[in-house]
Amino acid sequence: MPSKKKSPTIYDVAKLSGVSISTISRVLNATDKVNAETHKRVMKAIDQLGFVPRAEARARAMQSTARIGVLTPFFTAPSFVQRLRGVASTLSKANYELVIYPVDSMAHLQGYISSIPLMRNIDGLIIMSLSLGDQDAQRLSNNGMETVLIEYSHPQLNSIVIDDQHGGQLVAEHFIKKGYKSFGFIGDIEPPEKFAIHPVKSRLTGFKQTLQEAGFSLPKAYIRSSPYTQKESRQAALELLSLPKPPTAIFAASDIQALSLMKVARQLNINIPNNLAVVGFDDIDVAEHVDLTTIRQHLDESGRLAAEILLTRIGEHDRPLQHINLPLNLIERMTT
Amino acid sequence: MPSKKKSPTIYDVAKLSGVSISTISRVLNATDKVNAETHKRVMKAIDQLGFVPRAEARARAMQSTARIGVLTPFFTAPSFVQRLRGVASTLSKANYELVIYPVDSMAHLQGYISSIPLMRNIDGLIIMSLSLGDQDAQRLSNNGMETVLIEYSHPQLNSIVIDDQHGGQLVAEHFIKKGYKSFGFIGDIEPPEKFAIHPVKSRLTGFKQTLQEAGFSLPKAYIRSSPYTQKESRQAALELLSLPKPPTAIFAASDIQALSLMKVARQLNINIPNNLAVVGFDDIDVAEHVDLTTIRQHLDESGRLAAEILLTRIGEHDRPLQHINLPLNLIERMTT
DNA sequence: TGCTAAACTGAAAGTGCTTTCAAAAAAAAC
DNA sequence: GTTTTTTTTGAAAGCACTTTCAGTTTAGCA
């Protein structure tokens, strides 16, 4: 049997019920102006076709939109996902739709930023881990697009950040307290792409500074900059552990990289934590599974918070901007 | 001077820049087809007026919204995320927006299913790991909403599935080949929620059957049904490994549960793979990091495929339905 | 029964944009 | 210096409705 093609339009309804489209429109909008008899006939046709006026749907779904967008790089990394999860759960409760704009190039970002406040009909925006130029921030702000930045901050927009440097400090303190003497660092210090944020430098700074203040050193040779990818992280880890006198305590700037490090250590038969201590950063879900000591940054919570801020500001546009600094804490597990 | 009138339309821009509206539209959509000179003039006019194309009018003219939706259960599990990633990358390339509808209850699902085709604010729908009643499938199909099901299939809609039973078989064969003699199983056999799919039973069936055909047995006591959560998986693992004569080879129905199992083994000082072999299912990203032997089901690929099918069907509505069965293969790493 | 006001209804003119088609202009080929 | 392509551009035809304006009916009332 022939399947129905396009969804029915007002014309189809008109034809089926034998009246003009104007009448259909009236039935839909100003019921009172239509004869009861006709009204019934039209309704029957509408039901029969399963007709839904698109404009109305659009108005319902778009004008007062109930939809918020999230700009996120790649959203491949577990940390993004966990944040997204926080966002999603809050939004879902409030009956908001979640539109995701994966960013994978600078041009992409620019395109979104310039078109989002305009064309896209969302009534709020969350920007995760992406740096934003003054002009763009200005534009968003001017256009009245409620925005929350995560992992980046700008005076004109709401933001949620963590103190990465403090995170590095926590790690150093932990290592010292545990009695380790020789330290290393793995992380993608070089910004992987211009458009993405790289808080790794701050983590390193905090780590290094604290060590130095305590009288320890972090030689250049023990600092490996490696991109986020598995292969390269592993390469960096291998190099670090193959040094004549490898460090005994390594801080990996992300849990994923810590995992790579652990994998290499396993292959080299280096026992963790006896011969090597590892601390990660993020506390992603799997960190617990593999018993990784790490810095917890409450990823879910940051997402949840971002969504909540957005929602309240959408409700009351004149609420003051919020700049939130989320606390960090070290979760000690089995790798130190 | 901030005396704003009506928001400018494409006509205003046309007048100001001295070209026709078609050209404006072209500048906005197909930049390459416009003379550089003209392009610049138009852009200037656009900026000057602060012109913003109205999404509604645009969608109407294009008869499409360039937006597709994904229905997914609590998108917390890594496997969902990886699939989503595949979807996102494909969609992003094709310039489609991705709207996520997290489903966390039966009512939720129902609500979405019945309103989505009506609202018509998406061009296509991907439904991940959710079972769909005949009526709902019918409704989607009738309403001409292009849909792709993942991990579930229905004759009236496109679908992408894997052969879970075969997966179980692969695991059993691998164990046997490796010389293991005593087997166990951990997985959430009981459907966690009515609305979610539970392919775990099939995995178990394939596993068990193959073992039996090879002359081995899988006693009831060695089959632990446990929900997906960490805590309960761990409990199940603990019970299994604490038996007087624990199995030496365990098949975990998901990688996450395999991780829990590995964690418990570590705590009990059971060496993997010498004293215990573990095989997971999914091959999520971290599986490689922790060197878990597992069944790869190409999560990314399934997402990508789903999106591609959707896109081509949106382009040509009369393309035949596709029912794809994705191949499974065992990736041997260090846990067996 | 005749006449007017009220109640309905349809034709057609927007709405703001995309896209096709063909003309005009510019560039390339002869 | 023509002729043929190719590139640009504008006119006009949608898209799916809403609304205005008039024409028809119908109802109300002498």
Image (cartoon, coloured by chain):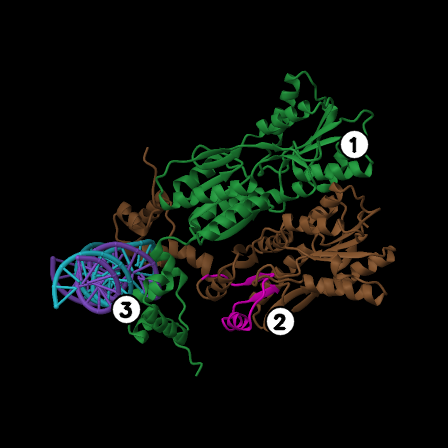
Chain colours: A brown, B green, C purple, D cyan
Hey, what amino acid is under mark 3? Ser
Give the secondary structure at mark 3: loop
Q: Is residue A26 visible?
A: no
Q: Which mark is residue B239?
A: 1
Seen at 57% across and 36% down, the residue is B297
In the rendered view, does B180 fall on the left or right side of A62?
right
Does mark 1 fall on the same chain as mark 3? yes
Q: Is residue B27 above or below residue B82?
A: below
Q: Are marks 3 and 1 in contact (CB under 8 Å)?
A: no
Gap between marks 1 and 2, in whole Å? 52 Å
Q: Position of residue A133 (x, y in %)?
A: 55, 70
Can you say which quadrant of the picture contains the N terminus of chain A? top left
Query: Mark 3 belongs to which subunit?
Result: B
Q: Amino acid at mark 2?
A: Leu
Q: x and y percent of residue A53 in the render?
A: 37, 53
* Residue occupying image coordinates x 68% and y 22%: B176
Q: Quadrant of residue B290?
A: top right
Part of the protein shown in magenta:
A120-149
**Residue A296 horizontal/vertical position (percent):** 73, 56
| Category of crowding for the residue at label 2, using alpha-carbon neighbours closer than 10 angstroms: few (below 14), some (14–19), many (at least 20) | some
**Which residue is depicted at the point 40% across and 56% down?**
A56
Tell me if residue B211 can be seen.
Answer: yes
**A175 with respect to B184 (left or right):** right
Which residue is found at the position 52% from the left and 43% from the top?
Answer: B303
Q: Which residue is disc 2 drawn over?
A: A321
Q: Quadrant of residue B170?
A: top right
Which residue position is annotated with label 3?
A: B20
Which of pointers 3 and 1 lies earlier in the amino acid sequence? 3
Q: Tag 1's secondary structure? A: helix
Q: How many marks?
A: 3
Q: Which mark is residue B54?
A: none
